[in-house]
Image (cartoon, coloured by chain):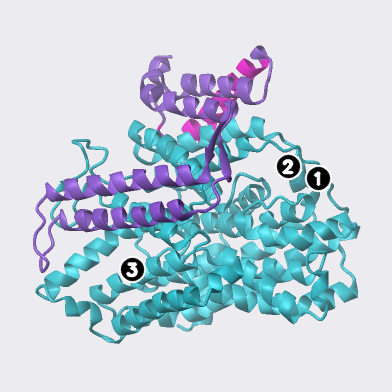
Amino acid sequence: MRFRLDLRTGEMIIAIGLAMIGGAMVWGGGRMPAGSLAVPGPGFFPAILGVLLVLASLGVLITALRRSDNRVHVTLGNGDVLAVVLALAIVPPLFETLGAPLLFAVFLTGLLWRLAGLRWWVAVAGGLGGSAVAWGVFSYLLGVQLPAGILAGL
Amino acid sequence: MDAFSHLLHGFAVALTWQNLGFAFLGCLWGTVVGVLPGLGPLAGMTLLLPLTFNLEPATAIIMLAGIFYGAMYGGSTTSILVRIPGEAASVVTCLDGYEMTKRGRAGPALMLAGVGSFVGGTVSILGLMLLAPPMAQAMLTVGPGAECVLMVLALIVIAFVSSGPVVKTLAMILAGLALATVGLDPLTAWPRFTFGSLDLADGVEFVAVAIGLFGVSEILLSLDQKEDLRAQAPKLADLIPRKADLLAAAPSIGRGSIIGFLFGIVPGVSHIVSTFVSYAIEKKLSKRPEEFGHGAIAGVAGPETANNATTGSSMIPLLVLGIPSIPATAILLSALLIHGVTPGPQLLSDHPDIFWGLIASMYIGNFILLALNLPLVGLFVNLLRIPFAYLSPSVLMICLIGVYSVNASGLDLAMMAVFGVIGYGLRKFGYDVAPLLLALVLGDRIETSFRRSLTISDGDYAIFMTGPAAQVLLIAAGSLVLLHFVARAFGYRKGMS
């Protein structure tokens, strides 16, 4: 599964995204005390930066629109990239609840199965082994604070 | 105490078993991440950052610096043997290095790249040692106005020397500065863009953004291009270069050392630009320029020397001014701040152990790398045979551990994932994400020095133009912008492309 996007459209999307961030900065900065030119307040910098970001985005947009050759395409992602993105998306909300050992085991198993094309039981063994090694090295040896989650009582 | 006595003290710090061990570990890991395509110095440093939390500050910085210059060494191996640059600064080495490999001369190419890296690295450390103390002394007299101008100048330089188009780089810098405004206002503690989250009160976590933009996005980009690597490592006996090779490489190594050192001081993508400049100069000065691109030894020795010569000098802005000039030194800055050490002109007087210990460790590290890289080149090349599909899940897991360990925050993990995807998209469309990261580091300090200067001057903006330091910096910034537009007017960029 691959997405193809021409360079001009992609650059326009990024420019619009940046302009929206700039606009949000101006709006957000306006809701904070701006102070004065002599004594700038907390809203001063965000507002100024927002304006500059909108201007820079316009520059990117104009450059993209002036691009004469629209045949250059950029290929975005494939099944593996999507699998990694999905795996990364499920980690943050479950990390503290499920705990690092269990989540890492699932994370590694899923990715080893998908990316390396391993048989399911080899991927499970790799996932469990990798998670155990990581837990041992980082939590026990290096003293990194990782949540044990539902395995905390064991 | 003079520089020599300080250096002796530095060696006393660097030669403890603990520091020596961590310097070796840093060099070894640096070489590994340099060799492996998809992992560069930045990813390598950020991945081991959590390991430094329980270490002494000097030990932490010695190890991280070892990764930085180790990756510079390691990057050349894959460029020469399989035409895949381990990191961006080794792109130029591919041109002639791989051609030499195709002609059965990989050994001399690797050997001279290693020797050049050693010479360049040593020259730049020497320069760092001699230049940093007087510069730090001079910086102590600079007020917040000039400090603010200096940081803005650093960002302007980055915008104009970056590898991408200026307008795109400017947009990245402004996005980085915008990100830096998230969190409590540095002077009034007013919450800005925190959306009521306590996790965001301290601002956007630099490590999460750095690992996302560089580590995760690099993995996503690598998964986009699956390549089967078949690297052949030369035997130890094949490494010995011919006399003619040595004679041809010696002047290139000398020039590369100077070019690399000078470019290392300039903020931006100094180590990348220095390799291109070195290559162009070598080609220009060569009696046989037609050999370049077909296995010219000067085309390998010069850029590789320049690449490594930037490592020492790129530490000057960080250690003397507290300004990271490239993303790798931004990680060093972050590590120092985590340990409660603020880099800047007072680092030399307040933490001489760190400064001189680092310099001494870099001398030692250069020897370690020379000893590691040449005899063990076969071992490192074997790393390339590990399929990336096996490697990437483990690397991603270490990224998650690294980010979580900083603040024990799930939000940071989400931020890493989001910035990973953003970095992937931006890099696909030709954006250089390094300026965003540097602006994120400097943003808070630019705003603080700007507002503090105005408080001191009673709102008088002339404070940014008062004093010789501020005036010199403003003239430099103005000249740079003018030079850019003049160059554009005369079609310089067009000609370059």
A143 is within the stretch colored magenta: yes
- The structure residue drawn at horizontal position 51% and vertical position 65%, both measured from the top left corner, is B358
**Label annotation for residue B152:** 3
- The structure residue drawn at horizontal position 47% and vertical position 71%, both measured from the top left corner, is B316
Is B413 rendered above or below residue B122?
above
Position of B281 compared to B404: left or right?
right
Residue B305, by quadrant, is: bottom right
**Label annotation for residue B231:** 1
Q: For this rendering, which residue is in front, A81 or B86?
A: A81
Magenta: predominant secondary structure element? helix
The residue pinned by badge 2 equals: B384
Say which amino acid is labelled 2: Leu
What's the CA distance linking mark 3 and mark 1? Answer: 45 Å
> Are the two marked residues, 2 and 1, in contact with CB atoms closer than 8 angstroms?
yes
Say which amino acid is labelled 3: Val
Say which amino acid is labelled 1: Ala
Is B476 rendered above or below residue B179?
below
Give the extent of the magenta segment: A122-145
Image x and y of residue B169, in percent: 43, 58
Q: Colour of chain B?
A: cyan
Image x and y of residue B449, in percent: 23, 67
Q: Which comes sooner in the sequence, label 2 or label 1?
A: 1
| Chain coloured purple here | A
Q: Which comes sooner in the sequence, label 2 or label 3?
A: 3
Image x and y of residue B327, in percent: 47, 57
Q: Secondary structure at mark 3?
A: helix
For the C terminus of chain B, the image quarter is bottom right
